[in-house]
Image (cartoon, grey):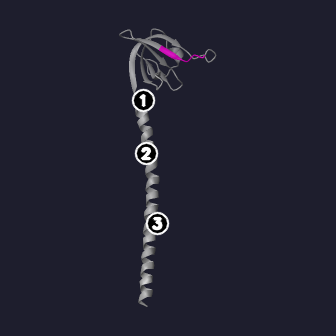
Amino acid sequence: MILYLTYDKRKNEMRNMCKKTTFIFIALVFICGIALPGFTQRTESKAERKTETKTVTGTVDSVSSADPAKGTKSEIILNDDKNKKFSFLITSTTTMYGAKSVAITLEKIKKGDKVKVKYATTKEGVDKAVSVRITP
C-alpha cells in the first residue's frame, strides 16, 4: 500500500512538471512571436532615418523634361547665391508649388525663376528633389 501511494505521488509530480514545462515553452514561443517582428521594424525605421533632407535656394539655370526615347530624366539645374551649381532629379513624387503655394507642373518653372528646393541624396549620390517652390 505504501509503495502504491509513493508511485501515485511521483506520477502526479511528473504530470505537474510536464504541465509547467509545456506552459513555459508555449509562453516563450508567444513572446518570441511578438518580439521578432518588432526588431525588423526598428531596422527599417533606422534605414528611413538615414535619408535626411536638405534645402537650397537659388536661381534656375535650366529645366529639362524627361524624354524616354533619348533616355533622359527630368531635372532642374540652379545656381545658389554663391554661384554654386546644383542639379536635382525630378521624379513623379516631387511636389512643385508656385509663388502663391498653388501646385504647378515642371513646365511652369522657367530659367531665371528663384526657387527653394528640398532634396535628399540617394545611396547612389544623386540629389533627388522632394519639393520645389518658386519664391517671390
Residue at the spot x=43%, y=87% of the render? Answer: 3
Q: Position of residue 106 (x, y in %)?
A: 52, 17
Question: Which is nearer the eye, 12 or 41?
Answer: 12
Looking at the image, residue 30 lies above or below residue 37: below
Q: Position of residue 105 (x, y in %)?
A: 53, 19
- Please say whether residue 72 is visible from this viewpoint: yes
**Quadrant where the N terminus is found in the figure:** bottom left
C-alpha separation, residue under disc 2 versus residue under disc 3: 26 Å
User: Where are the magenta residues, as a range?
Assistant: 71-76
N-term mark: 2 or 3: 3
Q: Residues within 10 Å of mark 1 (few under 14, many from 20)?
A: few
Looking at the image, residue 134 lies above or below residue 2: above
Q: Residues within 10 Å of mark 3 (few under 14, many from 20)?
A: few
Q: Say which element carries label 1.
A: loop
* Left or right of 14 in this view: 65: right
* Disc ID at residue 51: 1
N-term mark: 3 or 1: 3
Mark 3, residue position:
22
